[in-house]
Structure formats: C-alpha cells, structure tokens
Image (cartoon, rainbow, N blue to C red):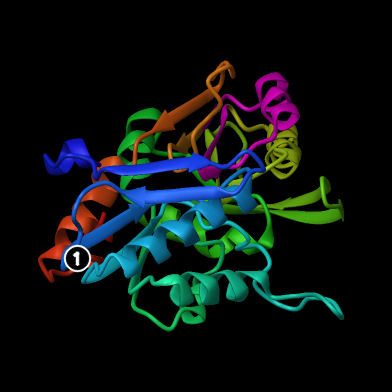
Amino acid sequence: MAGVLELPLGEVEIRRFPEGEIFVKYTQNIRGGDVYIVQPTCSPPNDTLMELLIMLDAARRASAKRITVVLPFYGYARQDRKDQPRVPITAKLVANLLVTAGATRILALDLHSEQIQGFFDVPVDHLNAHPVFIKYLRRKLQKDSVVVAPDSGSVKMAHRYSDMLGMGLAVVAKRRISADKVASSHLVGDVDGRDCVLVDDLTTTGGTLIAAAEILKKAGARRVFAAISHYCMTRAGHERIQQSCLHEVVTTDSIPMPADWVPGKTKILSVAELLAEAVSRINGDKSVSSLLRP
C-alpha cells in the first residue's frame, strides 16, 4: 500500500516484554497527522487485536488528528448475532473496543455480514474484493460459466458476482454438522458441462468449499474454481484443498499465508492497490463507493 501511494511506512517500534505484554512506541512525530493503521485481526486473533488496540491508544495519546483503522480482515466477525442462548455478540464487542481505543474511522474489506458496519459509532467505509476478482475471473472462465453460492449465506454475494460477470447462478444447500464439518445436500441450478466458481467471504477448514465442489462435479461441472476473500485456512484445511477436486482457489492477501506453505492450487491476488486508493480518497475527502463499480 505504501508503495502504491509512494509514501514511506510510518516509524513504529513494537516489541514484547519477557512475560508477553506488547509494547508500542511511535518513533516519529504524528501530532496533528492522519494516521492509518493497517492490521488484519487474523490468527492469532487475540494477539493481533491486542496489538491493534495498543497502537490505537498510543496514536491517540500522541495527539494524532485522525486515526483510521484499515482492516483487511475483521476477526470475530462470525460472532455477529445471538443465534443461541447465553452467547456473546463478539463482533460488536470488538467494534466497541476499537472505537474506545481511539479509532475515528474504519476501512474494512468484505465483512462477514454487512450489518457489522452498524456496530461502530464512527464512519465505516466497506470495500468488497470483487473489483480484484472480476478482472482475474473474466480471463479464466468461459462465457457459459456459472457462479455458485456454496451455502445460503453467500447467495447475495454470488448474485452480485453473477450480475457483474454476466453468468448464470446456482446454489448448493449446506447443513453444518459441527464447527469444522459440513454436509452439502443438493444443488439448485444447471452446471452440466460448464465451469463453476464458488464465491464466499472466508474459509477456515475448506469443508464447505470441498463438499460443494464434489456436488458440482457429480452434476457434471467441467472445472470448479473458488473465489474467497479471506483465506483463514488451517494447515489441515489448506492440505485438504490441495487434494480436493477444486481446480483453483483464488483469494487475496488480506491474510498473510505462512511462508512454509506451498500455494499449490491457491492463487493469491493483491488488494494493496484497492486499499491504497481507498486511503487516498478518504484522505482527500473523495467518494470511496465509486471504487466498487465493475
């Protein structure tokens, strides 16, 4: 992002005390400045979130004029409602923590659900990764390809991609057995002899994608791609993806992939230019929503 904006990275020292406490110090003057803190709250989520909160507090106490948190990935976003008794709404708790710590604006990429924007008491600019994906998918897919929602929760996203790509739409029904196991039951839509692309905002174990891909292949799909905004994959899940019937999984660098993982079927696209342009527009008080036009 700094390279796209032709700006140097801010100077900050981050280290840990022997017992694990995080220490942050800005080593340059930020008084009266616009500060953009880029931090995906990905694995390990508690450490990355705490580091972000401490950076926010340090920036606020250093008299920064405006502090924008850039969240390529918003951790705890799946806990966005009370779907059973006596459980928290952790996505709202995290929003409260960020604002209390000093955030004056949030720039987020593909939140798990759009209502999370309402959890913040500061302005939120919500970007989608589809401008990055659409360019790539148009080169890879045939005109008769089908966009597929791997479960009911991703139907809205799949419909958006279907419209932008000018392709058909299909839906795979899913039943969750446990936190890491799913069962896909049936398919709505015609995929016989066509390329398919499964679209979703995130994947952790790959179970939903793999189960949906198997259903599509049984229905006669030619090749099955997946476009996933956030690759929150466990090591075991990443290995399952490589051994699955999926032809390619296209994702973004919103979450860093461990250096010792072999990408294999995983194609990583950069969102640096998209986020950098949004930062430039925010800083110049220009429209951000126009970035999302295909």
The image quadrant that residue 107 belongs to is bottom left
Q: Quick check: 218 above or below 90? A: above
User: Residue 218, how many percent across, how many down?
Assistant: 75, 33
Per the image, is 238 magenta?
A: yes
Q: Is residue 127 left or right of residue 192?
A: left
Q: Nearer the viewer, residue 44 or 91?
A: 44
Q: Secondary structure at mark 1?
A: helix
Q: Is residue 204 left or right of residue 160?
A: right
Per the image, is 244 magenta?
A: yes
Residue at the spot 38% in from the left edge and 70% down from the top edge? 103
User: Residue 37, how many percent across, how many down?
Assistant: 34, 54
Q: Is residue 157 left or right of residue 58?
A: right
User: Residue 239, how many percent across, how many down?
Assistant: 70, 23
Is residue 236 visible from the viewing direction of this image?
A: yes
Question: Which quadrant of the figure contains the C terminus?
Answer: bottom left
**Stretch in magenta:** 223-249
Q: Nearer the viewer, residue 163 or 136?
A: 136
The image quadrant that residue 279 belongs to is bottom left
Residue at the spot 28% in from the left edge and 50% down from the top edge? 275
Q: Which residue is mark 1?
A: 282
Q: Quick check: 230 above or below 87? A: above
Residue at the spot 48% in from the left edge and 81% down from the top edge? 118
Question: Which quadrant of the figure contains the N terminus?
Answer: top left
Q: Nearer the viewer, residue 262 or 129?
A: 262
Is residue 166 visible from the viewing direction of this image?
A: no
* The furthest residue to the front: 18
Residue at the spot 53% in from the left edge and 20% down from the top edge? 259
Badge 1 density bin: few <14, some 14–19, many ≥20, Cα 10 Å: some
**Mark 1 is on which residue type?**
Ile
User: Residue 250, how many percent across, how many down?
Assistant: 48, 34
